């Protein structure tokens, strides 16, 4: 059993986020100039047009690669990448998303948007970057995030519009599924599971962690801290990740852990039995009924989900979410 490949670009080959753009700068260096903020007012209104009609009014644009092709109906954070036709990642562009329900084989009218997106770097300080990520030229380097508001479930077509070289261009639409998935939502109780620890495996961390070196998030059993302390629970597999974003997700979580470890517990849970794809999911992952990987949940001291992330996120994003539960 394998999870569907996500964060892959559409075309003749799958395109991962990293290794296809400018060389990343260490977060320890001076901060780069912030990219311009995308605003809804800077993008065209749908005005009753279909996605095809909207696209026709703009130039041919980048390839849109989604972090996930399954979304919760309603408002949900959506991560994606943009690539040019030579398969290089496009970073820090003013970008917005449009969506339309799919009826039959085509996107219909009823376009919603624009939903402005923000570019988030997945870079970490050098001491938190794993060898797994460092040695993987296809590891994710950054992500655009947008708060999508899809009014109903079903199949939807998504299209990205970006400002490149001072003109607006549009991607080809991609299909995603919107529905009511069983994974715990914000405001709901987290599902209690017992997670393996360094002690429970007799120090054999490699048996419960594919990261190199293993993460430091195997010191406590999730069930022992749930409802007692704030906790961050990350479901990710650094070496077996189908989307190539798990490694960066774990690295980002490690950096945030270094700041909050006195007040918040951090637990990393692998995905596959015995760390082998063909053996299926570990029971802990299966119990949470997650449709993809990686997933990260920020849970308050009452055991309630305060924030959740499907796919990648930046240090700043996770730090803000963890600070919120640490203060209450």
Image (cartoon, rainbow, N blue to C red):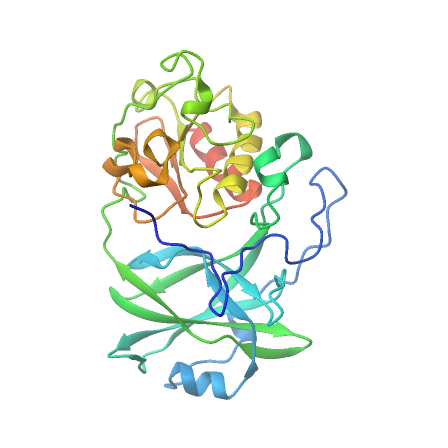
Q: Is residue 309 above or below residue 163?
A: above
State the residue in front, 26 or 112.
Answer: 26
- The quadrant of the picture occupied by the N terminus is top left
| Front in this rendered view, residue 294 or 3 | 3
**Figure quadrant of the C terminus:** top left
Considering depth in this image, is 303 or 200 the residue closer to the camera? 200
Q: Position of residue 231 (x, y in %)?
A: 40, 28
Q: Is residue 39 visible?
A: no
Q: Position of residue 301 (x, y in %)?
A: 35, 26
Q: Is residue 282 left or right of residue 253?
A: left
Tell me which residue sits at (57%, 27%) in the image.
259
Residue 263 visible, this angle? yes
Residue drawn at x 36%, y 59% as measured from the top left: 69
Q: Report the side of 130 relative to 178 (left or right).
A: right
Is 13 drawn above or below residue 273 in the view shown?
below
Q: Is residue 3 above or below residue 211?
A: below
Q: Quadrant of residue 194?
A: top left
In this view, which residue lies farthest toward the right? 30
Q: Which of 323/35 is in front?
A: 35
Residue 273: x percent and y percent? 32, 32
Task: List x then y, in percent, for residue 125.
Answer: 66, 35
Most extreme residue toward the front, as rendered? 278
User: How many badges with numbers are in the image?
Assistant: 0
Q: Residue at x 27, y 44 (%)?
A: 183
């Amino acid at each position: 059993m394998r999870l569907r490949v996500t964060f892959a670009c559409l075309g003749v080959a799958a395109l991962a986020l990293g290794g296809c753009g400018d060389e990343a700068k260490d977060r320890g260096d001076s901060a780069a100039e912030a990219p311009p903020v995308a605003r809804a007012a800077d993008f065209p209104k749908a005005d009753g047009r279909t996605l095809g009609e909207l696209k026709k009014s703009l130039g041919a644009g980048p390839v849109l690669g989604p972090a996930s092709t399954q979304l919760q109906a309603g408002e949900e954070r959506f991560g994606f990448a943009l690539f040019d036709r030579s398969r290089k990642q496009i970073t820090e562009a003013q970008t917005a998303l449009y969506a339309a329900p799919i009826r039959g084989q085509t996107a219909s009218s009823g376009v919603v948007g624009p939903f402005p997106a923000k570019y988030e770097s997945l870079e970490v300080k050098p001491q938190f970057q794993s060898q797994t990520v460092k040695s993987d030229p296809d590891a994710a380097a950054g992500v655009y995030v947008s708060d999508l508001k899809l009014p109903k479930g079903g199949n939807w077509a998504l299209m990205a519009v970006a400002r490149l070289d001072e003109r607006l261009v549009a991607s080809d639409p991609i299909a995603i599924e919107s529905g009511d998935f069983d994974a715990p939502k914000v405001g709901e109780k987290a599902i209690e599971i017992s997670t393996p620890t360094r002690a429970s495996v007799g120090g054999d961390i490699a048996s419960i962690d594919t990261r190199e070196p293993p993460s430091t998030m195997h010191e406590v059993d999730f069930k022992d801290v749930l409802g007692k302390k704030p906790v961050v629970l990350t479901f990710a597999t650094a070496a077996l990740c189908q989307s190539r974003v798990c490694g960066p997700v774990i690295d980002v979580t490690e950096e945030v852990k270094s700041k909050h470890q006195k007040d918040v517990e951090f637990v990393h849970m692998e995905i596959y039995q015995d760390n082998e794809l063909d053996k299926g999911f570990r029971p802990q992952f299966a119990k949470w009924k997650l449709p993809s990987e990686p997933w990260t949940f920020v849970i308050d001291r009452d055991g309630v989900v305060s924030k959740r992330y499907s796919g990648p996120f930046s240090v700043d994003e996770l730090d803000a979410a963890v600070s919120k539960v640490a203060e209450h």
